[in-house]
Image (spheres, rainbow, N blue to C red):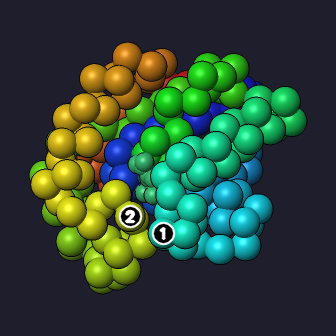
Amino acid sequence: MKNIVLIGFMGVGKGSVAREIIKISEYIALDTDDLIESMENRKINRIFESEGELYFRALEKSVALWLESSVKNTLISTGGGFYKQKNIHKIGKIVLLDSPFKAIISRIKAHPNAVKKLSKRPLLKDLRKAEALYEERRPEYLKIADIVVDVTNKSALDCAKEILKKS
Ligand code: S3P
């Protein structure tokens, strides 16, 4: 079993899909943001506020190197900017969860915890800037993905099944 690396924009549902995959397969799961929060013993928002984005990206790099050298048979969900790590293809098979920006925002807003979901993500605070970031990243996501799954209007379970079938 090769690692599966879930990439995609903030709020697209990487965490929800990861939770379904581990329910219906032998994979165990790791999340790059969770690893960073444990390494630093503070939330992503705090890291951005006190140290800035470049510091956070350096933490993502350490996580990427560790995943490449030490992690096998694992489903890895990643933060929306993790795809930029140079060694990402050496970590595992890259699966992009793809959806239009508007659908992603509607999905977040429909969630009972919408306010928390928006406020815990520093790069989603200004939706106009977030949309520009989405437009900039989407072609890059598509370029590096081994498998693309359109998640729009699909349940997390259906996406999970599709990923396991295709990978
Ligand atoms: C980021 C996405 C976030 C988190 C950080 C930066 C990004 O993760 O890693 O706030 O650059 O897109 P999610 O994609 O899980 O929200």
Quickly name the residue at label 1: 49
Q: In the image shown, does 79 or 125 lie closer to the viewer?
A: 125
Is residue 36 found left or right of 143 in the rendered image?
A: right
Q: Report whether the residue tagged 1 is closer than 8 Å to ligand 1.
A: no
Is residue 5 found left or right of 67 in the rendered image?
A: left
Identified by mark 1, the residue type is: Glu
Q: In the image shown, does 48 or 95 lie closer to the viewer?
A: 48
Residue 21: give x, y in percent of width and height: 57, 49
Label 2 and label 1: CA atoms lie apart by 8 Å
Dividing the picture into quadrants, the one containing residue 124 is: bottom left
Quickly name the residue at label 2: 122
* SS of the residue under disc 1: helix
Name of the residue lying farthest toward the front: 51
Using the image, determine if residue 50 lies above or below residue 162.
below
Q: Residue at x 13, y 54 (%)?
A: 128
Q: Which residue is drawn at 60% across and 22% down?
A: 86
Identified by mark 2, the residue type is: Pro
- Whether residues under marks 2 and 1 lie with C-beta atoms below 8 angstroms apart, the answer is yes
Observer-side mark, 2 or 1, equals 1
Residue 69: give x, y in percent of width and height: 84, 30
Q: Residue at x 38, y 64 (%)?
A: 122
Q: Report whether the residue tagged 2 is closer than 8 Å to ligand 1.
A: yes
Residue 130: give x, y in percent of width and height: 23, 52
